[in-house]
Image (tube, rainbow, N blue to C red):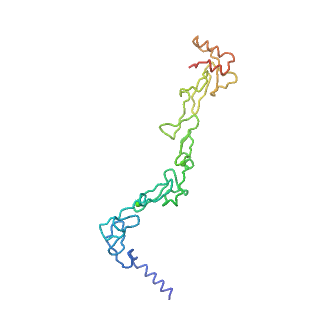
Amino acid sequence: CVRVCTRVFIALSSWLPAAPPGGSTGTCAPWCPLNSECVSATACRCKPGFASSSTEIFTDPLEICDDINECVPPMKVSCGKLADCQNVEGSYYCMCSPGYELRSGGTNFTNASENTCQDVDECKQNPRICKGRSTCINTQGSYTCQCLPGFELNPEDPKLCTDVNECASGQNPCHKSAHCLNQVGGYQCRCRPGWKPVPGSPNGPNSTVCEGGAQRPHSEARSTEDHKFKGSLSTEALSNSVRPCL
Ligand SMILES: [Ca+2]
Ligand SMILES: [Ca+2]
């Protein structure tokens, strides 16, 4: 009989209305303003996250329950470092600062004790975040795109690297006897037509030193200097004596 009676009681209980928050009186003030709940037939209380300008429990139907901004004094919840507090209607939350995330990968939490904010590795998260010809460098709270050698960041698009024209930089990177030839991602120092690298010097790298040029049409002054190239002048001697032939 005990088991049956218990079952009947449970069944009946489910039909009964839930007890009001005010207690066992069974009556509830019907006028409780927005964002509040009744505590009795004549009084209300603001819901959690809201506060009235008077007492906690009030009897004035014109009372207003305003959102509590938990992010500013006197509440001022502590979210911990690398995090910000965000107030919302009836609540608040803590979130990792931009560029940081919780160890779990999420961003939202409720107080400093749950704070595990750490730097996001944008380079791992999105391997294509930097466009071609650049390398992603992760930094605390951010990342940068570093151009490969021979390229520089485009001032109009900080993620895009464009070729550096070393030959137009104003600092001729080649020996005076060689001609600078710009290439994508680099440049070459090549001997002009009719000229050739001095013995032991390659034709292309920035160390290229050329000799010759006797066949070229030149002014007398230049021709005089050209004669100095003939023979076996050292690189040092060339750099001292050769004028650029442009
Ligand atoms: Ca709030
Ligand atoms: Ca980062």
Screen quadrant of the C terminus: top right
* Nearer the observer, 106 or 39: 39
Task: Examine the image and state in which quarter residue 44 appears.
Answer: bottom left
Relative to 55, is 19 above or below?
below
Residue 143 locus on image (x, y percent): 53, 45
Task: Examine the image and state in which quarter residue 211 appears.
Answer: top right
Left or right of 36? Residue 9 is right
Residue extending furthest toward the bottom: 1
Left or right of 107? Residue 149 is right
Residue at 56 percent across and 44 percent down: it is: 137
Residue at 55 percent across and 35 percent down: it is: 151
Residue 21 locus on image (x, y percent): 39, 74
Relative to 20, is 93 above or below?
above
Q: Give the mark count.
A: 0
Relative to 152, is 195 above or below?
above
Residue extending furthest toward the front: 74
* Nearer the observer, 196 or 79: 79
Residue at 48 percent across and 84 percent down: it is: 6
